[in-house]
Amino acid sequence: MNETIALLKRRRSAAPANMTGPGPSADEIETLLTIASRVPDHGKLAPWRFILFEGAARERAGEIALALKLADDPNLDEAARAAERARFSPAPLVVAAISRAAPHVKIPEWEQTLSAGAACMNLAIAAHALGYVAGWVTGWCAYDKRFAAAIGLAEGERVAGFIHIGRPKIALEDRPRPPLNQIVTSFSP
């Protein structure tokens, strides 16, 4: 079987809680981001960018998440507080893929948004190709304008996903996939 097809057939998402270090090296991160940026990009707009969370930056992002949750609910219980603090900590690397889709005279915003999604998927596939696991996560932080501002997003930018990358703590099991006869039709004239 073709190597690429074999990789794609065995790719699985991993929950961040099931990840550990060590994470990718600086050279591997450069490779991951180079591959993530090699996606369809009508008009060569690069309608996405990336924010890296490594080391103490992961804990800082968790502290920001906790502060925002506490602002909304000062009575947050200790388990919920711990979950927010640890939100970005399990994986040694978290990459925020940021969509910069914007009105353009020729390129629809939808195409730009899809390009950001393709960048997320390329990043996850590249991580697997390098021997890591990845999980594409959103969660409330991806949609919260206060969190977006705190991590440096500009007006009009949106989090397409937080891609958590690390080593697997456990063997990844496949999940049921939809049978093709339920998701594929043929157009008939």
Image (tube, rainbow, N blue to C red):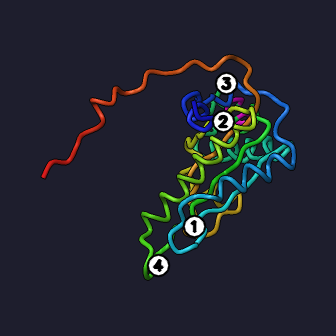
Of labels 2 and 1, earlier in sequence is: 1
Q: Secondary structure at mark 4?
A: loop
Q: Secondary structure at mark 1?
A: loop
Label 2 sits on residue:
134
Instruction: Estimate the x, y position of residue 66 in percent, counting from the top left.
Output: 69, 41
Label 4 sits on residue:
104
Q: Quadrant of the N terminus?
A: top right
Q: Secondary structure at mark 2?
A: strand
Circles 3 and 4, Cβ within 8 Å, touching? The answer is: no
Of labels 3 and 4, earlier in sequence is: 3
Circles 4 and 2, Cβ within 8 Å, touching? The answer is: no
User: Horizontally, is 95 left or right of 9 in the view?
Assistant: right
Q: Residues within 10 Å of mark 2 (few under 14, many from 20)?
A: many
Depth check: give the residue in front, 123 or 61: 123
User: Horizontally, is 186 left or right of 75 in the view?
Assistant: left
Of labels 1 and 3, earlier in sequence is: 1
Look at label 1 and name its amino acid: Pro
What label does residue 79 carry, if any? 3
